[in-house]
Image (cartoon, grey):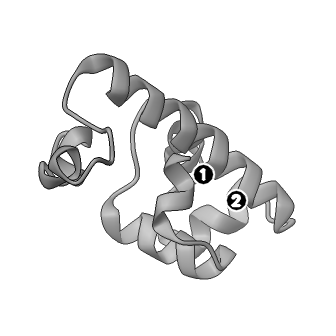
């Protein structure tokens, strides 16, 4: 599996995005991701079970996404962004 920070382009730092591969920034991104996964799901009135089924994962796996024990794949994030009508960047803000 690709490390979480591998999802982020190393060029973001050069473009002034402020993200680098240091642990503090990675933890901020992980926190934002897990909070937004839950927020966007509840705003769209879906259960964890429904989202898990749509992604083709188990409910415990999806729960791990929201608690930060694991991170969703880029494909799963893309599917969620389309389902919630959100830009992928919004999951990290």
| Residue 49 tag number | 2
Q: Residue at x 22, y 51 (%)?
A: 12
Q: CA distance from mark 1 to mark 2?
A: 5 Å
* Foreground pick, 25 / 6: 25
Q: Secondary structure at mark 1?
A: helix
Element assignment for label 2: helix
Depth check, front residue: 75 or 55:
75
User: How crowded is the residue under tag 2: few (<14 C-alpha within 10 Å), some, or many (20+)?
Assistant: some
Q: Which mark is residue 16?
A: none
Percent coordinates x, y for residue 2 in the rendering: 15, 47
* Picture disc at residue 59: 1
Residue 65 shown left or right of residue 86 in the figure: left
Residue 85 in the image: state x and y as whole percent.
Answer: 65, 79
Percent x, y for residue 19? 29, 38
Are the residues flagged by discs 1 and 2 in contact, CB closer than 8 Å? yes
Q: Nearer the viewer, residue 93 or 64?
A: 93
Let me know if residue 47 appears in the view: yes
Residue 6, image x, y percentages: 16, 46
Quarter of the figure with residue 70: top left
From the viewer's perspective, tell me whether residue 35 is left or right of residue 24.
right
> Taking 80 as reference, is 29 above or below it?
above
**Mark before the other along the chain sequence, 1 or 2:** 2
Q: Residue furthest top?
A: 24
Q: Residue at x 53, y 71 (%)?
A: 87
Q: Quadrant of residue 75?
A: bottom left
Q: Residues within 10 Å of mark 1 (few under 14, many from 20)?
A: some
Please tell me which residue is depicted at 12% across the width and 48% down the height of the picture. Answer: 10
- Closest to the observer: 40 or 71? 40
**Residue 57 appears in the rendering:** no
């Amino acid at each position: 599996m690709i490390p979480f920070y591998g999802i982020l382009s190393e060029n973001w730092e050069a473009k002034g995005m402020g993200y680098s591969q240091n642990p503090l920034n990675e933890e901020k991104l992980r926190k934002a991701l897990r909070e937004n996964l839950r927020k966007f799901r509840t705003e769209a009135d879906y259960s964890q079970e429904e989202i898990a089924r749509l992604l083709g994962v188990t409910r415990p796996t999806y729960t791990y996404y929201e608690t930060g024990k694991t991170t969703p794949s880029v494909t799963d994030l893309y599917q969620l962004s389309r389902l919630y009508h959100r830009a992928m960047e919004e999951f990290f803000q």
